[in-house]
Image (spheres, rainbow, N blue to C red):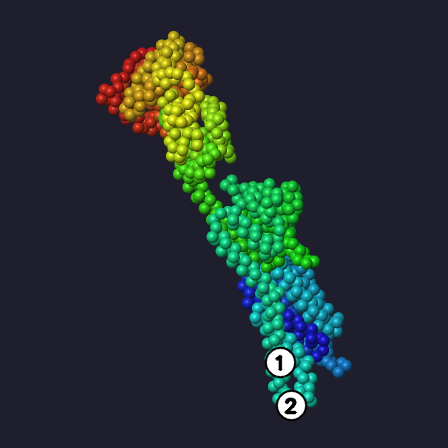
């Protein structure tokens, strides 16, 4: 056998080996295209081999098979490059296939393009001599056009990140193949084209492997092991069969007649032995590692499926990556509620985790749109990497990050794993292989689900133990934490502080539930921020908060309670909404073991302390000790001082109304009328005596700000100008400014501030709507408007009660509360409210 034929056999064997391997692989466009390229290579190489062997039915037929393979390779390669670059397949591309097949058929019939070679005897052998004419340039010109089209398509795809470095080896392989065919006549029968084809196939194989299209274990299937064993056995049989037959005939004459059978059996046994050796070798080289990775993946899956703790899952993930891939530096970033990805876990507690990626980070954006592991060397070629800040790039280099693994559940990026370099094995520094990437992708599918489930569990766990509004511990979990700390600190010290917000029901009535909720949240933040990590904070009930203070003595707890009480008292003073009422708290303190011998007694005594503060005038701090309530604020007669808060400020109210009466009599009488109507409405809807007293005072003071408006505007006859109307509207803010400086009169501000708001949100000064307007303000709006209509003004006569009632009905739902208007009209109709008809000189 000549060396030339041996080259063809080697190439054919190589192509067949690859084709068998890829036929068993999971099919994709690239795999199918590569199989098509291998098929044309086999057609070309197999035809060439059989032609050189002059096999039946003649070398000319095999020559045409070989030539067809050569002329179809460019088109097969074109399809491979097209799909590799992600270019769309178009119908016009098939013109290349049609022309190539037409050339093959024409040449098969006529030999006009390139005739079959002539056989020439040379040195005891046979050489194939080609007689090329100008016609051969037609087909090779066609091949050149296909190659140029392929290269142009590859150049167009260079704008895609990382595509240039991937396509260049393929273009090199294609040029190698094309030049090998052109150089065939120069080498005078030497199969340079076959060698070029082998080189091109190696380049394509390497490109697919680096693209992570397949795994090396695919090459070691049973079929391929049989092919290897058969190939080695055939070569051995071809070279040793005659010598072995002669040896048997000479050395063992009695077996001479069975020598052929013996050689065949030995060949079969050798084939089986080579197969088992090959299989064992490949198992040790590839499959053993894959089995090990599969086992570790299974163990990891079992481990994380049994845990809902995030730290346990992340720890298991770090361990399996470190042990399987020999990676020492691993950082895990988990998404927070604000969308950022801070470093949450690392392979070593000494690692610097003081970094975070926000939701707009270029790396995060790239990972969101891709579903596979990312090598940093590939990421460096992307636009996203180039848009990163230099210090972010420097951090990746400093941390020696080489691989980035997204944790995605469907399209939801729940976390990011940053992997450092793989440690050396012996003298070699191995990078991340296709098998490593496949293993990481398998880990990702398990880990992302586990991480998301753990976050959902932690969220549910937190929601079940925290108050939805304030974020503090809820009452149920408060008792669990209290019991746990009681068992730990019963022999040392455990202090319980309960804060009860004073007059909170009134606060809600004045400002609405929305403002009440805001106040509770603010109070919770103050308590939590002050207690910090020294204890536990809970929402004990609707308007009560509790602080559990392990190892706190009574004195320290008192200081902390005073600090919290002072902050709560000042929180509305520091607010931009200066009309809000000042809030205070009544605080009760009890400690174990000083004043309680059991858990129930601890809670009961703290509650009793709060109760005594409430009975003694509120806004105080009391300590329960040995059944005796000791109060730091010991002013006697405090209860009497708080007994009639509203009657105490009655002289102030009437002094202010008298002042406005001196400037304009109408305002004084108008305020009294509004107070009468408002109190009647409030009584009809079932409010408390305390609430009606507040409403009455608000009605008397609602226009007190007009004391600062010039008399020429107050008493102007005719329509006001825009500037004058703006000045008139400012009386609301002026009223609030006057009332705000009166001691303990701030509770009337919501009604005064909102009595010109409209139910549809088109009023002033805050343009609030519906039930967001405090109830007292909605009542004043109806009463104020009715009295303004039935009273005589300097610019209009008084209107009839019927007309005023009609206007109220028209404005129900737009200007007025639709629930209050029918009630007020009914009261007028049945005589519960008697309209006060007086003439005035005032302008509203």
Q: Are marks 1 and 2 in contact (CB under 8 Å)?
A: no
Residue 100, placed above or below residue 837: below
Q: Residue furthest right?
A: 123
Quarter of the image with the N terminus in it: bottom right
Q: Residue 134's x, y, as percent?
A: 71, 70
Q: Which residue is mark 1?
A: 267
Q: Residue 497's x, y, as percent?
A: 43, 30
Quarter of the image with the C terminus in it: top left
Q: Secondary structure at mark 1?
A: helix
**Residue 807 appears in view:** no
Q: Nearer the viewer, residue 376 or 541?
A: 541
State the residue at coordinates (66%, 55%).
424
Q: Earlier in the sequence, mark 1 or mark 2?
A: 2
State the residue at coordinates (64%, 56%).
431
Q: Quadrant of residue 688?
A: top left
- Left or right: 251, with 829 as reference point: right
Q: Nearer the viewer, residue 811 or 627?
A: 627
- Left or right: 642, with 548 as reference point: left
Q: Secondary structure at mark 2?
A: helix
Q: Quadrant of residue 466?
A: top left
- Left or right: 749, with 803 as reference point: right
Q: Residue furthest top?
A: 662
Q: Nearer the viewer, residue 305 or 552?
A: 552
**Residue 265 appears in view:** yes
State the residue at coordinates (33%, 29%).
813
Residue 237, numbered label: none
Q: CA distance from mark 1 to mark 2?
A: 17 Å
The residue carrying pointer 2 sits among few (fewer than 14), some (14 to 19) or many (20 or more) residues within 10 Å by Cα, namely some
Q: Residue 631's x, y, as percent?
A: 42, 22
Q: Which residue is mark 2?
A: 256
Residue 786, placed above or below residue 651: below
Q: Residue 580's x, y, as percent?
A: 43, 23
């Amino acid at each position: 056998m000549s060396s030339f034929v041996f080259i063809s056999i080697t190439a054919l064997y190589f192509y067949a080996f690859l084709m068998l391997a890829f036929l068993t692989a999971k099919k994709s466009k690239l795999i199918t295209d590569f199989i098509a390229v291998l098929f044309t290579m086999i057609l070309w190489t197999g035809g060439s081999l059989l032609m050189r062997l002059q096999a039946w039915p003649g070398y000319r037929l095999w020559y045409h098979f070989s030539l067809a393979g050569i002329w179809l390779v460019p088109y097969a390669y074109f399809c491979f490059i097209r799909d590799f670059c992600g270019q769309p397949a178009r119908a016009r591309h098939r013109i290349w296939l049609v022309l190539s097949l037409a050339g093959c058929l024409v040449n098969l019939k006529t030999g006009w393009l390139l005739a079959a070679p002539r056989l020439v005897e040379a040195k005891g052998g046979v050489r194939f001599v080609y007689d090329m004419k100008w016609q051969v340039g037609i087909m090779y010109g066609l091949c050149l056009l296909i190659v140029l089209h392929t290269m142009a398509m590859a150049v167009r795809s260079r704008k895609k990140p990382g595509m240039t470095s991937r396509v260049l080896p393929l273009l090199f392989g294609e040029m190698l193949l094309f030049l090998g065919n052109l150089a065939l006549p120069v080498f005078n029968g030497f199969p340079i084209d076959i060698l070029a084809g082998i080189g091109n196939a190696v380049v394509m194989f390497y490109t697919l492997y680096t693209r992570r299209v397949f795994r090396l274990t695919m090459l070691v299937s049973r079929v391929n092991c049989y092919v290897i064993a058969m190939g080695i056995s055939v070569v051995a049989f071809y070279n040793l069969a005659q010598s072995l037959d002669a040896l048997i005939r000479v050395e063992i004459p009695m077996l001479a007649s069975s020598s052929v059978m013996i050689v065949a059996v030995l060949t079969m046994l050798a084939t089986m032995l080579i197969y088992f050796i090959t299989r064992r070798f490949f198992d040790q080289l590839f499959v053993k590692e894959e089995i090990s990775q599969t086992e570790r993946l299974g163990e990891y899956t079992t481990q994380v499926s049994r845990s809902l703790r995030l730290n346990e899952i992340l720890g298991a993930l770090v361990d399996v990556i470190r042990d399987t891939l020999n990676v020492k530096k691993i950082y895990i970033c988990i998404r927070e509620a604000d969308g950022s990805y801070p470093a949450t876990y690392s392979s070593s507690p000494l690692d610097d985790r003081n970094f975070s990626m926000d939701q707009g980070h270029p790396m995060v954006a790239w990972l969101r749109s891709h579903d596979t592991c990312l090598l940093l060397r590939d990421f460096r070629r992307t636009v996203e990497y180039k848009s990163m800040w230099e210090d972010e790039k420097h951090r990746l280099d400093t941390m020696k990050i080489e691989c980035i693994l997204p944790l995605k559940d469907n399209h939801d990026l729940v976390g990011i794993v940053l992997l450092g370099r793989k440690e050396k094995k012996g003298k070699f520094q191995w990078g991340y292989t296709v098998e490593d990437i496949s293993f990481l992708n398998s880990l990702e599918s398990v880990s992302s689900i586990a991480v998301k489930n753990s976050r959902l569990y932690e969220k549910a766990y937190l929601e079940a133990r925290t108050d939805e509004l304030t974020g503090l511990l809820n009452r149920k979990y408060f008792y669990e934490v209290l019991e746990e700390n009681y068992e730990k600190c019963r022999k040392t010290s455990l202090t319980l502080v309960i804060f009860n917000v004073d007059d909170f029901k009134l606060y809600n009535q004045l400002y609405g539930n929305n403002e009440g909720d805001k106040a509770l949240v603010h109070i919770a933040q103050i308590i939590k921020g002050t207690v910090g990590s020294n204890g536990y904070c809970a929402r004990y009930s609707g308007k009560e908060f509790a602080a559990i203070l392990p190892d706190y003595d009574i004195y320290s707890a008192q200081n902390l309670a005073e600090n919290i009480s002072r902050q709560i008292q000042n929180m509305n003073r520091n607010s931009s909404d200066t009309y809000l009422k000042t809030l205070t708290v009544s605080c009760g303190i009890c400690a174990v073991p000083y004043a309680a011998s059991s858990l129930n007694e601890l809670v009961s005594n703290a509650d009793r302390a709060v109760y005594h503060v409430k009975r003694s005038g509120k806004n105080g701090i009391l300590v329960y000790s040995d059944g005796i309530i000791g109060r730091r604020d010991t002013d006697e007669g405090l209860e009497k001082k708080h007994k009639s808060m509203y009657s105490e400020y009655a002289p102030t109210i009437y002094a202010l109304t008298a002042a406005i009466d001196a400037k304009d009599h109408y305002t004084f009488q108008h305020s009294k009328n509004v107070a009468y109507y408002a109190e009647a409405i409030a009584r009809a809807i079932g409010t408390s005596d305390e609430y009606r007293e507040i409403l009455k005072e608000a009605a008397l003071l609602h226009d007190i700000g007009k004391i600062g408006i010039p008399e020429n505007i107050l008493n102007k006859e005719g329509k006001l100008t825009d500037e004058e109307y703006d000045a008139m509207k400012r009386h609301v803010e002026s009223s609030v400014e006057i009332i705000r400086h009166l001691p303990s009169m701030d509770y009337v501000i919501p009604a005064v501030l909102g009595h010109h708001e409209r139910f549809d949100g088109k009023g002033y000064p805050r343009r609030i709507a519906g039930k967001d307007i405090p109830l007292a303000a909605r009542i004043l709006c109806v009463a104020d408007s009715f009295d303004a209509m039935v009273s005589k003004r300097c610019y209009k006569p008084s209107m009839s009660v019927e007309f005023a009632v009609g206007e109220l009905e028209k404005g129900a739902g737009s200007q007025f509360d639709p629930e209050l208007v029918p009630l007020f009209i009914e009261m007028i109709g049945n005589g519960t409210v008697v309209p006060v008809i007086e003439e005035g000189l005032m302008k509203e």
